[in-house]
């Protein structure tokens, strides 16, 4: 699903919900480039670009990652479709054409000819069939990709250029699925050759080839000299201009910024807002920023706990959170107050929803808790039937400021909140198991179908345990409605229902920041990560 904040969490959560894998919809990333750096110069070939991310990959097998490898494996591969950043339309990429049947269940692709894997194997329709069959095979135990490809009923490759995907039912979000790194074609020949070590020796069709991966030191890529199938939005559709691209894992944000200042790295990702603001007008650097799509930063309540089975308690929690104060304290005003789980940069968000959200109102929240039977005792703590209202807030260091603010806000109403801070992997494990009273979550995903994953009773990341037949029906309808306007209305209804039932406390939507040394030119943000096909180095 790093002091990588919400993106780090989402990366760790495993894939569906962020994994840096989808293009940003309805949100053009902003780039701040000092005026004296904006004048064009002739692109050059050669040199090395070094990038720092907050996390190291667990594997470079795109199917087998628990979620932290998306930014690494995407460089190695490609996808059937891509989203045109200018029009937000899905267009063929590794396919030359595609069509969808009238009932939207049969998707037929014509695979481009002349494309080869890094090991020289030709890319054919069979390559995709082998890739998808491997991903869907339970013996592979590729949970994330299997979940992503769950809509597929069958995969056929009647000839080298024709790929036919039969779906169980129409799926409006399936284009997104076919445009992300998880569904990139893999070389079965390379997988069989490498066996269990394939995760250290990946082979794709992308602009970069793996040179080496040393844990603790970084992943080094060399340009794929045979690459000539870049998307049309790249100025350079052939091999990358740089000789090498190195990605280093630097978890501590201050160390990342120090490395940028010293010249040890050229690009720092997931830059804290306090640092990004300082670099905006610095002529030595460029800043790139965008409002993350998906679901915003939220307080999630475990609905299996008796306290949260009472809607009045859930509503009270929504009223006790001073969201504006958290936005100012955590994002220094760069974020936005959240009224609904879905981010404004995601299809389906509607500004009219803001009037349905709960307003900060401590007195009204206290009244709701009183009416629910949770009365303040002589110690100033709420109790009901002899039970103290005491909760564990499962958190981690990245969310420390939010956790402390929430502890104080809930404490003002007599709710005893204890913060349980875990290191990232332990935190993710406990959240996935549902071992929390309340916790902090978010997720980056381009399509509103992320709400299905988070809130459908069978959703892969329904960690709160929501079970709501009306909501299930709406989420299924949103997934299977193809017409865009009709789909937007469904998600408007979904969000209204989520607000009415107060299943979570939406808190804020935040931005992602990347800072780039101005000697590196041509970095583009065409997805939820920078890309380097057009990049070159000015000495």
Image (cartoon, rainbow, N blue to C red):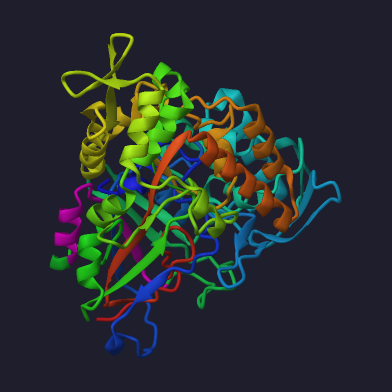
In the image, residue 179 sits, relative to residue 207, either above or below, namely above
Magenta region includes residue 259: yes
Q: Judge from the rendering whether residue 485 lies leftward or rightward of residue 294; answer left or right.
A: right
In the image, residue 510 sits, relative to residue 129, either above or below, namely below
For image coordinates 62% across by 49% down, the residue present is 492
Residue farthest to the right, as pictured = 102
Say which quarter of the image contains residue 96: bottom right
For image coordinates 59% across by 24% down, the residue present is 138
For image coordinates 39% across by 39% down, the residue present is 318
Residue farthest to the top, as pictured = 386
Q: Position of residue 443 (x, y in %)?
A: 44, 44
Task: Locate the N terminus by quadrant.
Answer: top left
Q: Position of residue 80 (x, y in %)?
A: 64, 55
Say which quarter of the image contains residue 201: top left
Magenta region includes residue 186: no
- Residues rendered magenta in the picture: 241-260
Residue 461 visible to an observer of this rendering: yes
Q: Position of residue 221 (x, y in %)?
A: 37, 57
Total numbered circles: 0
Residue 189 visible to an observer of this rendering: no
């Amino acid at each position: 699903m790093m002091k990588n904040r919400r993106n780090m969490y989402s990366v760790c959560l495993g894939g569906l919900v962020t994994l840096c894998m989808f293009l940003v919809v309805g949100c053009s990333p902003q780039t701040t480039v000092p005026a004296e750096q904006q004048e064009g110069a002739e692109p050059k070939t050669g040199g090395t670009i070094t990038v720092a991310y907050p996390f190291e990959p667990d594997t470079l097998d795109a199917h087998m990652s628990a979620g932290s490898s998306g930014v690494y494996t995407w460089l190695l591969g490609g996808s059937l479709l891509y989203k045109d950043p200018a029009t937000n339309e899905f267009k063929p990429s590794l396919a030359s054409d595609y069509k969808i049947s009238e009932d939207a269940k049969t998707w037929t692709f014509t695979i481009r000819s002349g494309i080869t894997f890094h090991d020289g194997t030709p890319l054919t329709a069979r390559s995709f069939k082998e890739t998808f069959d491997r991903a869907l095979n339970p013996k592979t135990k590729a949970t994330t990709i299997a979940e992503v490809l769950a809509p597929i009923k069958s995969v056929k490759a009647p000839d080298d250029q024709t790929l036919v995907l039969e779906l169980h039912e129409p799926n409006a979000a399936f284009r997104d699925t076919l445009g992300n790194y998880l569904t990139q074609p893999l070389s079965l020949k390379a997988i069989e050759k490498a066996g269990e070590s394939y995760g250290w020796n990946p082979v794709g069709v992308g602009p970069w080839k793996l040179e080496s991966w040393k844990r603790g030191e970084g992943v080094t890529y060399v340009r794929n000299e045979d690459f000539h199938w870049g998307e049309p939005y790249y100025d350079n559709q052939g091999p990358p201009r740089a000789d090498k691209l190195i990605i280093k894992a630097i978890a501590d944000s201050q160390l990342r910024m120090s490395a940028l200042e010293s010249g040890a790295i050229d690009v720092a990702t997931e830059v804290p807002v306090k640092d990004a603001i300082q670099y905006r007008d610095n002529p030595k650097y460029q800043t790139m920023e965008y409002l993350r799509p998906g679901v915003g930063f939220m307080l999630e309540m475990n609905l299996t706990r008796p306290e949260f089975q009472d809607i009045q308690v859930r509503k009270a929690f929504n009223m006790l959170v001073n969201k504006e104060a958290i936005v100012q304290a955590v994002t220094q005003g760069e974020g936005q107050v959240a009224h609904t789980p879905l981010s404004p940069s995601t299809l389906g968000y509607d500004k009219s929803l803001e009037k349905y959200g709960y307003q900060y109102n401590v007195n009204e929240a206290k009244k709701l808790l009183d009416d629910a039977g949770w009365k303040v005792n002589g110690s100033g703590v709420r109790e009901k039937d002899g039970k103290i209202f005491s909760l564990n807030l499962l958190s981690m260091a990245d969310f420390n400021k939010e956790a402390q603010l929430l502890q104080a806000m809930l404490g003002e109403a007599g709710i005893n909140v204890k913060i349980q801070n875990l290191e990232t992997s332990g935190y993710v494990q406990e959240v996935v198991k549902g071992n929390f009273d309340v916790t902090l979550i978010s997720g980056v995903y381009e399509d509103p179908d992320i709400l299905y994953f988070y809130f459908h009773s069978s959703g892969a990341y329904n960690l709160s345990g929501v079970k709501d037949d009306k909501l299930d029906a709406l989420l299924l309808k949103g997934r299977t409605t193809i017409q865009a306007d009709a789909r937007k209305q469904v998600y408007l209804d979904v969000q209204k229902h989520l607000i009415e039932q107060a299943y979570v406390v939406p808190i804020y939507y935040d931005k992602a920041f990347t800072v780039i040394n101005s000697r590196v030119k041509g970095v583009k943000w065409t997805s939820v990560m920078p890309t380097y096909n057009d990049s070159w180095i000015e000495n």
